[in-house]
Amino acid sequence: MIYSWKKIVKHGLPLLTITLLIEVFAGQILQGKQDALLMFPIFLISIPVINSVSGNVGSVLGARLASGLHVGYITLSIRDKEMHDNLLISVLIGIITYLILAIVIYFIAVFGNLITEDIALIEFIAIIILTGFLLISIVSIVSVLTAFISFRRGLDPDDMVAPVVTTVGDFMGIVFLFIILGIFGVGI
Amino acid sequence: MLAKEMVKQSLPLIILCGIGAIIAGSTLGAMKDLIIEIPGLIVIIPAIIAMRGNISTAFGSRLGSAYHLGIINADNLWNEELLENIKGSLFLSFFVSIIIGILAYITSFLLNVYPNPVKIILIVLIAGVFSAIILTLLTIGIIYLVFKRGYDPDNITGPALATFGDIITMLCIFGSALLVEVML
């Protein structure tokens, strides 16, 4: 027998516990800003979306870098052109996705009567795009760093990138959203 | 050329996962009243979703590797190896749910919010274990279909679990919070 449930639990627990501690802190930020979120439920809907897109884009980037490093067409250099191309395209894909999803969310909120306070479509799109741009940039850089560092240490980037990127994305997504909301003066 | 290929191949899937997340987000929006009534509820939500994502994708990718190693296939799916993997995922979900509940209670306490610890731990536990059971069965179902058609499970399970995982987990949190609020 190759697998044993005890080993699965033992290997999974340490990384999961660290991950979840960070996620609980993200949850505490939500709790602290709860009143603003309940006043603008449209942002409550947006939080899983902001997090999911950054996690997926970051994981795809990480998987591509891992394959490139394993096969050898990406080198461990911060000047590697292939890596730069992948990074830029990830940011681009992220922005396009956030734009499309922001429009969808806005109309769902309008039809679901969830817009209790006045917020214009263009303002909502601007908030999501700015948050998304900051987030995707950070997450993509973290993805590159995690892939490169784990590869250099002889670890498989495929195992490392997804958990690191999703955790960083979940936490920073919530932080960036509230920073941008503060700049726009929404919910204060 | 490279850019075009990348955008063409990954953009539709990422948007599809985003649509899944919008359904999850709308469920969260529908929980407005519960969030007001149960202090600490909003704290555990990102953690439960992250736990589910981590444990299910690891389960899916282990089954993918098991397939490549020749341990499981379409004719020999229900065996000891699969059973150990299922047990591993379920026990891990059980322990981690309790850890989330305790962490959420302690950090709230430090921030001067006083949730009911029994309520919070029960909500995480019920949501965590139920979503684990549903997603484990779903993963096995997906793996079975993938085998039947002769595809590589590594390409399918990740995005499929990312799309359905968030929705199922959010619904489980909603149900569990409602249940605990009515019972206690």
Image (spheres, coloured by chain):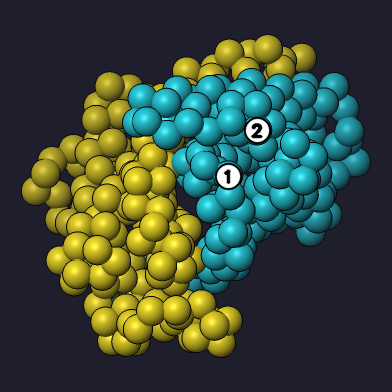
Chain colours: A yellow, B cyan
Please state if B161 lies on the left or on the right of A95 as rendered.
Answer: right
Label 1 resides on the chain identified as: B
Instruction: Indicate the secondary structure of the residue bearing disc 1.
Output: loop
- Depicted B4 relative to depicted B10: above or below: below
Please state if B143 lies on the left or on the right of A72 as rendered.
Answer: right
Q: Looking at the image, is mark 2 or mark 1 earlier in the sequence?
A: 1
The residue at 53%/53% (across/down) is B36
The residue at 61%/65% (across/down) is B30
Instruction: Indicate the secondary structure of the residue bearing disc 2.
Output: helix
> For the residues tagged 2 and 1, is the chain the same?
yes
Q: Amino acid at mark 2?
A: Lys
Q: Quadrant of residue B31?
A: bottom right
The residue at 24%/63% (across/down) is A188
What residue does disc 2 label? Answer: B119
Q: Position of residue B14 (x, y in %)?
A: 47, 66
Label 2 resides on the chain identified as: B
Residue A69 appears in the picture as rendered: no
What residue does disc 1 label? Answer: B38
Q: Amino acid at mark 1?
A: Ile
Q: Position of residue A31 (x, y in %)?
A: 41, 46
Q: Position of residue A150 (x, y in %)?
A: 30, 29
Gap between marks 2 and 1 measured at Cα: 9 Å
Q: Position of residue A152 (x, y in %)?
A: 25, 27
Please state if A12 lies on the left or on the right of A174 as rendered.
Answer: right
Q: Quadrant of residue A142?
A: top left
Q: Quadrant of residue B57?
A: top right
